[in-house]
Image: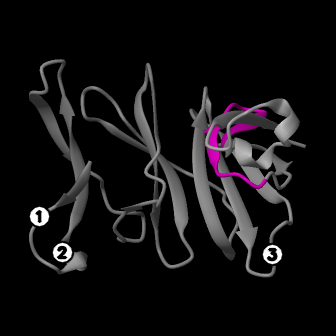
Amino acid sequence: MGYRPRVGTDTEARTYGGAVLNGSDQVVKLFEFPPTADGAKWTTVPSHRMAVDEDGASIILESGNDPNSSIVTIAESGQIRVLPLATVKGARYHDWFFAKGVVAELYQFAGDKPPVPTKIDTFDLVTGRKIGTKTLRPAGFSIACFLGDEFSMLAHSAHVEKSRGLAPAALRLVTVKLE
């Protein structure tokens, strides 16, 4: 997926789309994302994460200044399904993660300063329906993987007391349960 045309600096003229490839990396179908209901164009969220299942490849796209977010699923045929999400408005920080059957939005508001907990809204990947809200307590590491009810992160062993015998440059896996 990406923008076409690839040359030029007029971002308003860019159309976001992509291609479905077969196992030999040959183009099966080109597609473009249709405009939003109000005629705006879609852009990707900064994380660019995707999920793949039997329904196709799913990605989060957004439009507008206080973004309207949607789950967009591209089937093998190139057919596009757009499911609007009832996301929070006014957050200064958004990040998206996929797990089996769900997508999660992490967010913080402008007045929130670390180490406050990060809120996480989860949405059903098939219907776009909001499932619930959970909290991720500060762990001090960059999030690596969303596992549905917990996040895993890589951490430097320099954060661990020396009695464990780990080299300071070693990495360890930290898993944090959502509340």
Tell me which label, 3 or 2, sits earlier in the chain.
2
Residue 143, numbered circle: none
Is 4 displayed left or right of 82 in the figure?
left
The residue where tag 3 is placed is 113
Q: Position of residue 61 (x, y in %)?
A: 44, 56
> Compared with residue 137, is residue 24 higher up or lower down, i.e. above or below?
above
Q: Identify which amino acid the numbered label 2 is placed on.
A: Ala
Q: Residue furthest right?
A: 179
Q: Quadrant of residue 179?
A: top right
Is 97 displayed left or right of 120 in the figure?
left
Q: Quadrant of residue 149?
A: top right
The residue where tag 1 is placed is 5
Q: How many numbered tags mark residues here?
A: 3
Tell me the element at label 2. helix
The answer to whether residue 77 of the structure is visible from this angle is yes
User: Could you tell me what secondary structure mostly forms the magenta stretch?
Assistant: strand
The residue where tag 2 is placed is 13
Quick one: 15 or 25, which is closer to the camera?
25
Tell me which label, 3 or 1, sits earlier in the chain.
1
Tell me the element at label 1. loop
Q: Position of residue 97 (x, y in %)?
A: 59, 44
Q: Residue at x 70, y 62 (%)?
A: 107
The residue segment tinted magenta is 140-154
Please tell me whether residue 146 belongs to the stretch shown in magenta.
yes
| Neighbourhood count class around disc 2 (C-alpha, 10 Å): few under 14, some 14–19, many 20 upward | few
